[in-house]
Image (spheres, helix red, strand yellow):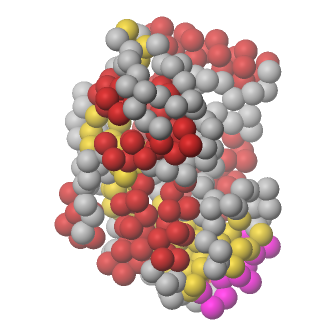
């Protein structure tokens, strides 16, 4: 099978491409010229391109059997939100069009659990929980919501598009790192003096990668599949990191109102005035008022997804960040 994969230089995409190469697939990987390609499979054909200009790489889809579209602009703060919508929404729309024109038989689109209808009370949501675009907080969530609607509409028009919704992947090769990876790095660097009351669903990135390849064969067109692991509060995550690393877990809990005040200050000073990414954003704090707990029962039932414990993935992430110079060694994690 010849696969065209976007986002292979990113966190999830690198695991998808690596696993696909191990399974013998022939790969064409879309990559911006400025991206770090050190983790790409050596056997892959690398295609220079950018989702904001899909027509430039249209010919690379010829002869491909399937597309796995992982790439996205994943940031909780952007100086120009229009660029995020251009990549995430219009880029997805145009890639699906190009796949149809090239007679690519199947597409797996990587959406996000961010498009689900989370609650403040910790209710565990699934693919059928009512939600609308008005529930989306911030440009990243709205852009992923809109892109998911594009994928759903393509499936309704008879294109074979399967939609995957990973929760919060963790593991090795989180090079940027992702917002969740930054939590781990900050903890390793002892920059986590307090926490807010919020919840996340953590999932091993390796199982997320495996599902992308399974979904090509077993996924139903137009269906969404949550790929999640354990539902944990932020405090529980920090406590697990403490056990893994030997570092202390913070004991002070910060009210959301205080976190929001700091976010407004940091976003104004660091973001607007200095033009740099702030440590805390209003969007992130607003998202944190909801417990992002989810069920993967549908993916377990229809795709054979396995809900794994996340301690091994957290340990993998800690060791990788330390080994690659993101943080110093700790008493336990080397």
Q: Quadrant of residue 49?
A: bottom right
Is 69 situated left or right of 295 in this image? right
Against 302, residue 286 (above or below) is above
Q: Residue at x 45, y 80 (%)?
A: 23
Q: Residue at x 52, y 77 (%)?
A: 21
Instruction: Give the image location of residue 182, x and y in percent.
Output: 54, 34
Q: Tell me if residue 250 is in the magenta stretch.
A: no
Instruction: Give the image location of residue 312, x and y in percent.
Output: 33, 47
Is 325 situated left or right of 48 in this image? left
Residue 178 visible, this orientation: no
Q: Tell me if residue 55 is in the magenta stretch.
A: yes
Numbered range of the magenta stretch: 54-64
Instruction: Give the image location of residue 231, x and y in percent.
Output: 27, 39
Against 258, residue 202 (above or below) is below
Pick the front one: 16 or 101: 16
Pick the front one: 134 or 296: 296
Q: Quadrant of residue 205?
A: bottom left
Q: Residue at x 27, y 64 (%)?
A: 305
């Amino acid at each position: 099978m010849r696969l065209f994969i976007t986002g292979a230089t990113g966190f999830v995409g690198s695991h998808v491409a690596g696993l696909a190469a191990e399974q013998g697939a022939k790969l064409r990987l879309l990559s911006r010229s400025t991206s770090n390609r050190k983790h790409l499979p050596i056997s892959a054909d690398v295609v220079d391109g950018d989702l904001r200009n899909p027509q430039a790489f249209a010919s690379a889809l010829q002869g491909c059997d399937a597309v796995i579209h992982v790439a996205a602009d994943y940031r909780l703060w952007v100086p120009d939100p229009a660029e995020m919508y251009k990549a995430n929404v219009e880029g997805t729309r145009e890639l699906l069009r190009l796949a149809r024109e090239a007679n690519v038989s199947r597409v797996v689109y990587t959406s996000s659990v961010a498009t689900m209808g989370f609650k403040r009370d910790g209710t565990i949501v699934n693919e059928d929980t009512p939600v609308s675009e008005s529930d989306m907080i911030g440009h990243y969530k709205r852009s992923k919501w809109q892109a998911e609607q594009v994928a759903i509409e393509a499936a309704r028009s008879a294109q074979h598009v399967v939609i995957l919704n990973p929760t919060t992947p963790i593991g090795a090769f989180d090079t940027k790192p992702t917002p969740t990876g930054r939590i781990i790095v900050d903890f390793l660097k002892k920059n986590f003096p307090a926490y807010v009351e919020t919840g996340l669903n953590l999932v091993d990135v390796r199982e997320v990668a495996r599902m992308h390849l399974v979904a090509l064969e077993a996924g139903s067109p137009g269906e969404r599949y949550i790929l999640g692991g354990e539902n944990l509060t932020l405090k529980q995550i920090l406590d697990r990191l403490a056990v893994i690393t030997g570092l202390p877990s913070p004991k002070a809990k910060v009210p959301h109102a205080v976190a929001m005040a700091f976010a407004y200050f940091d976003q104004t000073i660091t973001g607007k005035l200095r033009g740099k990414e702030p440590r805390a954003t209003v969007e992130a704090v607003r998202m944190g008022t909801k417990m992002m707990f989810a069920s993967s029962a549908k993916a377990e039932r229809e795709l054979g997804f396995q809900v794994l414990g996340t301690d091994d993935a957290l340990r993998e992430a800690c060791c990788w960040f330390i080994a690659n110079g993101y943080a110093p060694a700790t008493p336990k994690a080397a």
